[in-house]
Image (spheres, rainbow, N blue to C red):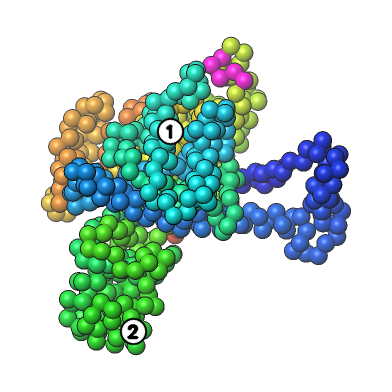
Amino acid sequence: MVAPKGESSGHLTFALADLAAVSGRLMFSALDLLLGESHVFLDPDGVRLTDVLKRSRSFQAVVSNALADQVLAALRELLRGLQQADALHSRDGDSLLVDLAERDPQQLYGGLITVLMRLVFLLYAEDTALMPGDAVYEQNYKVSGIYEQLQRDAADYPDTMEQRYGAWAGLMSLCRLVFDGGGPSADYLPARHGQLFDPTVYPWLETPWISDGVVQAVLANLLIVKGERISYRALDVEQIGSVYEGIMGYAVRRMSGRCIGLKSKPRGAKKQLTTAVDLDALLATPANKRKAWLEEAAATSLPAQAATALRNASTEAELLAALRQSINHDLFDGPQPAGSLVFQPTQERRRSGSHYTPRSLTRPTVEEAMRSWMERCDHQPTAAQILELKICDPAMGSGAFLVESCRVLAEQLERAWSREGLPEALQPGGAAHGEEPLLYARRLVAQSCLYGVDKNPFAVNLARLSLWLVSLSKDAPFIFVDHALKCGDSLVGAFFNGSNARDRRTKREVYLAATVSCDSAEELEEIMAEPLEALREGEKGIQPLHWDIAFPDVFERERPGVCVQGSGRTEWQGCLKIGFKGLGRVLCLGFNEGSWLISVPATTAHSPNYTRLQ
């Protein structure tokens, strides 16, 4: 057993019966090599057991980054399969997608992301024994079992995988079972509900015409990394989140002309990106403007010789020759026909990319954020004090810091129970009797203490799923934290509806007065309905978040307020003045340079005092 503090644990089992058999001599030798005196104490630095374990932990981040790239490849395979399915429906006089790519590309993109989120969740749940383990599930529904069957089919029928169907329908049946529940007993596969597995949200995913070849390619990208089968059980929940983040920040586009994928690494981006470029549009661009057109469309810079060849090109073949060093042949094996659906990185993706925050960073950050609160509790908070605490991440992404906050508070809650006695639910006859106290503590903390906001709806779903996974809530539906994780722009309140700075200042005072005077969230929501809807339906379609309306359970309690974790941008100053009335104490922890400790009188809505954290 290896269980480094603040990181995921792992174990390797040697069965004594096997070691005692003649056939187990090789295993016994392996055990000796692993734990023998030489390997533990005497071998040179760099090859001792502790060094090997350290490299293994570091390799987790490598696996996570590689898996994030492969998930993006799986997303592209899925888009290819969906386009093929659409063509088959059209051939039969039907239409699967109609004009969805033009009318609502976000709906199409969201459906594809949802499929991969479902698959990654199912693989993690299967590896952590959250799914049934009987023969019926193993032989008919298990995702990794479906992949193994497809591997056998590919070996037997290598030329027909694109003409074979059935695996996709099996996966969609499993997703319906997860949503509705099923099995011989109520606890066999409880209904999870929630948007992630809801078949009515993206009904076009229910098509039977996605080929086994596409499903095999998608699952191979999720299960095989660097030639080896990965175990999702060995990955932290945060790493699962980072895999999801790797596919955010893209949009589905239908290319009007023939296209090719070009590689680029824009300034500030963490990874190389591939952008589909319309070859017909590029060829139609005046020769002296093509280089600038390419830089704007794909952020691709060409060396002088290639730029000259691009300027002189008069045919598609000459364009391809000029761009050959920048073409991503792994994405497209050649120019794609006009009308192809592709994934394009958005401007936000080009600026920021995605990146994995390991527990070795989230743990000390969360502990520092809670340090002053722990000191006020003499480092021994009671169970009541812990469950009364409210923590909010206003830009939560995949929820990495909320997940670590859940772990830290749950550990404190378990210690409090050891001093005060177990809660009634864990005692004989209680609803959770027999359950591991730490997991039950995580569930209580997730439901009672943690709040989050993000303007990306897919990130919100991801954070909900991450908290479900970290609490291993086997019997709880996915919606058990829906009340606490909201979609919206945490920096945009109702007063942003003003037409200019002066108008916004006036509206801010009006809405602040309304916020302070209203007796309930329902009353405030009625007052704010018109300005909030105007922001949603405006030119930029901003999803605002008025804090008192979004979190009434926080702001209507006797001592309202939250402990805020997130970016310490100066915009937070104005928003905190507006959004948080009657705060006892708010902690806004910036992970870069702007970190602020913000104190507000407990019974007033006065402007806060700002003290820079050292």
Place residue 293 in its image quadrant: bottom left
- Relative to 67, does residue 176 appear above or below in the rendering? above
Task: Name the residue carrying label 2.
Answer: 306
Q: Indicate the secondary structure of the residue bearing disc 2.
A: helix
The residue range painted magenta reads 430-434
* Residue type, numbered disc 2: Ala
Question: Is residue 44 located in the magenta-colored stretch of the structure?
Answer: no
Quadrant including the N terminus: top right
Query: Callout 1: 10 Å neighbours few (<14), some, many (20+)?
Result: many
Q: Which mark's residue is nearer the viewer, 1 or 2?
A: 1
| Residue 303, x across and y down, in percent | 36, 84
The reply to whether callout 1 and callout 2 are in contact (CB within 8 Å) is no
Front residue of this view, candidates 340 and 596: 340
* Residue type, numbered disc 1: Leu
| Residue 328, x across and y down, in percent | 39, 69
Q: In this view, does 267 lie to the left or right of 229?
A: left
Q: Which residue is drawn at 37% across and 67% down?
A: 333
Q: Which residue is drawn at 37% across and 49% down?
A: 163
Q: Indicate the secondary structure of the residue bearing disc 1.
A: helix
Q: Distance between the residues labelled 1 and 2?
A: 50 Å
- Relative to 294, does residue 445 appear above or below in the rendering? above
Q: Is residue 25 left or right of residue 97?
A: right
| Residue 205, x across and y down, in percent | 32, 40
Query: Callout 2: 10 Å neighbours few (<14), some, many (20+)?
Result: some
Residue 372 appears in the figure: no
Task: Name the residue carrying label 1.
Answer: 174
Q: Which residue is drawn at 23% across and 80% down?
A: 315
Q: Name the N-terminal-most of marks 1 and 2.
A: 1
